[in-house]
Image (cartoon, rainbow, N blue to C red):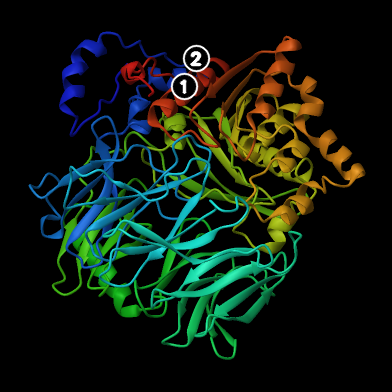
């Protein structure tokens, strides 16, 4: 069976090993599902893509960020056999292997949503700050490297195990300063600090005292502490209050926010006397508003009638938002600065004419820009790829930053938005990927997102786990069930106290929709998910709304009281848990929560189950998975367990991800009849 190799810039050591290790690689496993067998006979199946391309894609170069002065670029790429950062002069932007390129080995970076940006330039356009999470326990540490001293050891700004740190942004223009927060003094709150890379010193700016209960700090466009959001009561679910710092250092109350409302400043500009915030206060959907700092008067800047706004695009220093992004199905951007919108469209036109984009993009958004806004990185995403471009607004010149890669249009399938009306009339949305070259109902993997207060989003058809599953012959169904974020307050709160009820029915009815559409073979379906998605995997296998042939539970919740009683000390959203799952401090509700927990009904699971968990998970303790596996083993049920000692709530290190997805690939091949590419010689590389 044909496979796709790994092209491009292999490290010399890997290239030398390739010939020898290839002899050790196992053979690919052909499909057994009838639809896939027929497609193979008709020669319509796409080539198998090795698993390493999805998890150890060493030719990937992305995430370009401009230095504030516009003279340099930084991006993520492989360095040796691990993750690192690359830096080169902007003048050499189009030359991937230019003489000005320097690389810095960082190892696996922290997850972006845990502690803000994972890497950023400091205002001097020389130093870079980045975040590490060594064990997966979300106690992130900040490091700073000097790009003009490639051999110098990075400065460990926060070298304290068990302490969580988060980057908050730049310091004064031209300086080497930056703001960050950490909980070294009190694990339940974050104090504010300023670091200076030139002197390698740190000073405290503000402290979250016990009576202030600060939830967040805000830096203004003058690069000074300007605001804080604090919880007014000691109990989560109390109102919160945005306060503005006065010239004498005191705090002025600006806006009170109710428990289930949100109001989060995106920019505070005291020179303009304005702030801009994303909020759903007194609304169903999250919108972008502008507020007068003196009076508090608000005016609506942007909204999307169908969904919450994702974010606004702002210039680096002063100024109003330039654009905003939302995602009703596929993502879309609306430019408030029409001149900029025209320039972006012109850059896309140039990229299309030069063959840098294989189709008209779904969305093109500014990803980074210089302080003067004259240069910017644009991320242009088509159905099949994302390409990063450098636009020089002075000259109008456009350069491609993303290195050319082999076409994937014949390997992968586009992600299609869908919606259906649930049995109670609520409209539920999601995404579907069909296996390429397969006619008729195919084996189905239901990939259930976590949260539940997040959502699945559209992705281009490239090297993602979803496309790996489709490449193996599976239809992949994602469901933004009630309780998901992004579709407004009413839709999210419709999931409260329904996490084992109507929410699970939404998932089951989405599966039935896929069956009715002729997409899914009802006799060959599996459920897969992580965190709350792992809980839903267990719930679906317990409730059996369909004949699921197997399940994959990644860091799934099995015991709600235990999870809630052991959450991280810095979380301040206990009221959301109480609203959705129950109050663990009330005996009758605690009893119901335990009864609704999968561990209380685990004997009803008869389908084969694969359980995966990181030992250092602080969100869902590994004990949940330990207990699920031990109970099923005692009952003699088919269950397998994979645990990673150096991971947490997600598997981040590529060697571990390779082991994880290779196991999932083989598990699904057995229970659903899809393809497996077999042993990948990258599996021979040590994990530490």
In-image side of 151 versus 299 (left or right): left
Residue nearest the observer in this picture, 245 or 510: 245
In-image side of 637 versus 333 (left or right): right
Q: Is residue 318 visible?
A: yes
Q: Vertical placement of 526 versus 592: above or below?
A: above
Residue nearest the observer in this picture, 219 or 505: 219
SS of the residue under disc 2: loop
Residue 117: x and y in percent read 41, 55
Residue 603, by quadrant, is top right
Residue nearest the observer in this picture, 177 or 87: 177
**Residue under label 2:** 32
Cα–Cα span, label 2 and label 1: 7 Å
In-image side of 180 versus 635 (left or right): left
Q: Is residue 262 visible?
A: no
Q: Vertical placement of 550 versus 370: above or below?
A: above
In-image side of 85 versus 164 (left or right): left
Residue 470, by quadrant, is top left
Q: Vertical placement of 273 versus 117: above or below?
A: below
Q: Residue at x 70, y 23 (%)?
A: 628
SS of the residue under disc 1: helix
Residue 590: x and y in percent read 85, 41
Residue nearest the observer in this picture, 528 or 214: 214
**Where, quadrant-wise, is the C terminus in this rendering?**
top left
Q: What is the residue that sits farthest to the right in this orientation?
A: 588
**Residue under label 1:** 36
């Amino acid at each position: 069976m044909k496979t796709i190799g790994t092209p491009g810039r292999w490290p010399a050591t890997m290239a030398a090993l390739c010939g020898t290790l290839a002899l050790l690689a196992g053979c690919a496993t052909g499909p057994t599902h009838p639809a896939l067998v027929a497609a193979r006979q008709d020669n319509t199946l796409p080539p198998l893509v090795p698993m390493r391309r999805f998890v150890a894609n060493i030719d990937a170069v992305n995430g370009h960020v401009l230095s504030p002065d516009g003279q340099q670029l930084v991006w993520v790429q492989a360095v040796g056999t691990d993750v690192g950062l690359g830096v080169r002069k902007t003048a050499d932007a189009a030359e991937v292997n230019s003489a000005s390129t320097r690389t810095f080995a960082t190892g696996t970076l922290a997850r972006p949503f845990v502690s803000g940006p994972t890497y950023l330039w400091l205002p001097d356009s020389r130093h870079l700050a980045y975040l590490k999470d060594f064990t997966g326990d979300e106690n992130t540490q900040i490091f700073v490297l000097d790009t003009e001293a490639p051999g110098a050891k990075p400065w460990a700004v926060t070298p304290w195990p068990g302490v969580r740190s988060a980057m908050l942004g730049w310091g004064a223009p031209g300086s080497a300063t930056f703001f960050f927060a950490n909980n070294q003094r009190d694990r339940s709150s974050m104090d504010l600090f300023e670091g200076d890379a030139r002197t390698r010193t740190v000073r405290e700016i503000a402290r979250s005292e016990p009576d202030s209960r600060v939830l967040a700090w805000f830096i203004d466009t003058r690069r000074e502490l300007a605001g804080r959001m604090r919880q007014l009561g000691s109990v989560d679910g109390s109102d919160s209050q945005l306060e503005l710092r006065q010239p004498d250092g005191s705090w002025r109350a600006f806006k009170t926010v109710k428990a289930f409302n949100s109001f989060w400043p995106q920019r505070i500009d005291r020179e303009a006397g304005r702030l801009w915030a994303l909020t759903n206060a007194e609304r169903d959907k999250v919108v972008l508003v502008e507020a007068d700092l003196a009076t508090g008067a608000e005016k609506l800047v942007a909204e999307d009638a169908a969904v919450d706004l994702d974010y606004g695009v702002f210039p680096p220093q002063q100024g109003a938002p330039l654009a905003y992004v939302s995602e009703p199905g596929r993502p879309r951007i609306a430019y408030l600065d029409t001149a900029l919108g025209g320039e972006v469209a012109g850059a896309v036109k140039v990229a299309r004419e030069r063959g840098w984009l294989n189709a008209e993009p779904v969305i093109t958004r500014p990803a980074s820009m210089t302080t003067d806004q004259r240069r910017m990185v644009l991320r242009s995403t088509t159905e099949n790829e994302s390409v990063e471009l450098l636009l020089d607004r002075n000259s109008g010149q456009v350069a491609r930053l993303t290195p050319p890669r082999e076409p994937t249009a014949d390997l992968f399938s586009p992600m299609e938005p869908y919606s259906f009306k649930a049995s109670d009339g609520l409209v539920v949305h999601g995404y579907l990927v069909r296996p390429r070259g397969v006619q008729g109902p195919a084996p189905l993997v239901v990939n259930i997102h976590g949260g539940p207060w997040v959502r699945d989003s559209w992705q281009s058809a490239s090297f993602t786990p979803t496309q790996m599953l489709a490449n193996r012959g599976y239809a992949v169904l994602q469901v933004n069930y009630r309780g998901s974020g992004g579709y407004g307050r009413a839709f999210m709160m419709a999931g409260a106290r329904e996490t084992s009820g109507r929410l699970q029915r939404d998932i089951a009815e989405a599966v039935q929709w896929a069956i009715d559409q002729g997409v899914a073979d009802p006799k060959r379906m599996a459920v897969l998910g992580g965190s709350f998605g792992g809980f839903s995997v267990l719930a679906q296998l317990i409730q059996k709304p369909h004949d699921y042939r197997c399940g994959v539970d990644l860091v799934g919740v099995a015991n709600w009281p235990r999870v809630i009683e052991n959450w991280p000390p810095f979380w301040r959203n206990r009221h959301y848990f109480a609203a959705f799952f129950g109050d663990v401090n009330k005996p009758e509700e605690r009893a119901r929560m335990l009864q609704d927990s999968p561990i209380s009904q685990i004997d009803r699971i008869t389908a084969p189950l694969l359980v995966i968990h990181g030992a250092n998970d602080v969100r869902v303790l590994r004990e949940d998975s330990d207990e699920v596996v031990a109970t099923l083993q005692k009952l003699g049920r088919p269950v397998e367990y994979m645990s990673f000692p150096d991971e947490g709530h997600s598997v981040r290190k590529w060697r571990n991800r390779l082991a994880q997805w290779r196991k999932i690939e083989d598990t699904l091949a057995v229970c659903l009849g899809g393809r497996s590419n077999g042993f990948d010689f990258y599996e021979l590389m040590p994990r530490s």
